[in-house]
Amino acid sequence: MTNFEIIMPKMGESVIEATIIRWLKKEGEIIKEDDPICEIATDKVDSEIPSPVEGVLKKILFAENDVVPVGTAIAIIDMGGEDAEEPVADKPEKPAEKEEVVTETTAQPVGTPALSVDEQVTSTRFYSPLVKSIAKEEKISIAELETIPGSGKNGRLTKDDLLQYIKNRQQPVVQPPAVSKLEAPKVVTPPVTVSGDDEVFEMDRMRRLIADHMVQSVHTSPHVTSFIEVDVTNVVKWRESIKDSFLKREGEKITYMPIFIEATAKVLKEFPNVNASVDGYKVIRRKKINIGMATALPNGNLIVPVIKNADQKNLIGLAKDVNSLANKARNSKLNPDDIQGGTFTITNFGTFDSITGTPIINQPQVAILGIGAIKKKPVVLETKDGDVIAVRHMMILSLSYDHRIVDGALGGMFIRRIAQLLENFDTEMTI
């Protein structure tokens, strides 16, 4: 017989492992080509692993909820045919991580407990198996590990970060001259009481990631939010006039989102400091304009698929991308690449009839645009014959931005320019 190993795929540049959430097939079950075998999850996206071959699922090598390194065999499929050398069915040993561990250990600080398995599990921060191994070897407590700044994606602590910290910890500390200054108060989570009638349940994996991401964002960026009211009557009239013919011709619905994305992409080119990230005291201006759109999932969670090179696409292309990514998100079909590389984010409060909101920046970006619901309102218009009151379609835009590099003037000019493009939208435009 011929055996084929199903390998844990690489689900993105910075992803080194994934968790097996659920096995969709059982040992002994017949597998067809492209049949999904199991569901996996990373800190970025959930996905299914399909079988590239036909056969019988001979052996499952990992249990549900096991964390498996990328490139590791997770199952064996018997394809039949000639006898072949049997692959090892036992769980593969982890790579020799200790070769990379610093061998010289330092004295453990007094009163600092060693990192325990329970402490690792309850940590609110993600650590790779290699980082955990080094921390255990160096007797670094979970409390101490949480204080080490990370240079990885979303502040993740990398092996190099930890080794540099260990190196510095071994060196004698030179006390700087005393400087009179106020220390930032330590943030203490208030105790929560539970009564007998309250329902208590654990957050799911995605909600935990969202919670950590939001807390990290407000601790990283000093948020400021500016608001502007926009007359989008021209946009509404144009969409109403072409939506039926567009659907018939393209087989796609055209929503307001592609129009907002197109205007935002144009303004990001005019104000490149908003299409940026901050690294310490360095500002990174992004050459690509990749706009993420916050999308609500059926379970109430959010995910942000990204439209790549949005400034290079017309309304037809943007409409197709918006619809495709939204459908993939709601059906849990997003690929890791679909949610990576964003440089700016748009969130649509209007979907839930909210007139406005103060969105939280999607790190490591420096701004996020909030779109409120479009409402008919009486508005004073200036005409050559004097002021008149007319019913117009009005909307409020909100822009939250990182005040470290985007001040009130830049934020105000940016959001005002988007409003100008929307208010002067060409109702005679054809696509």
Image (tube, grey):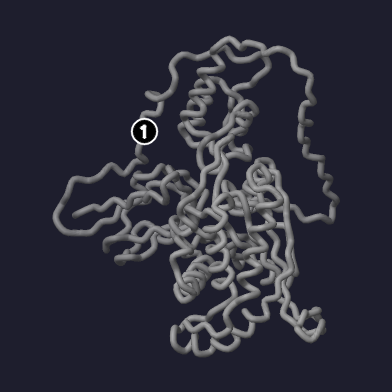
Is the residue 336 above or below the residue 235 in the image?
A: above
Residue 256 placement (x, y as % from top left): 59, 75
The residue under the point 61% across, 33% down is 118
The residue under the point 62% across, 79% down is 235
The residue under the point 51% across, 31% down is 132
The quadrant of the rendering that contains the N terminus is bottom left
Decide if residue 56 is in sight here: yes
The residue under the point 81% across, 81% down is 378
Q: Classify residue 330 by image quadrant.
A: bottom right
Q: Specify few, some or many for label 1: CA neighbours under 10 Å numbering under 14, 14-19, or 20 or more.
A: few
Residue 372 placement (x, y as % from top left): 70, 69
Residue 50 placement (x, y as % from top left): 36, 61
Is the residue 327 above or below the residue 119 in the image?
A: below
Q: Classify residue 53 by image quadrant.
A: bottom left
Is the residue 383 above or below the residue 200 in the image?
A: below
Kind of residue indicated by mark 1: Pro
Is 101 on the left-hand or right-hand side of 362?
left
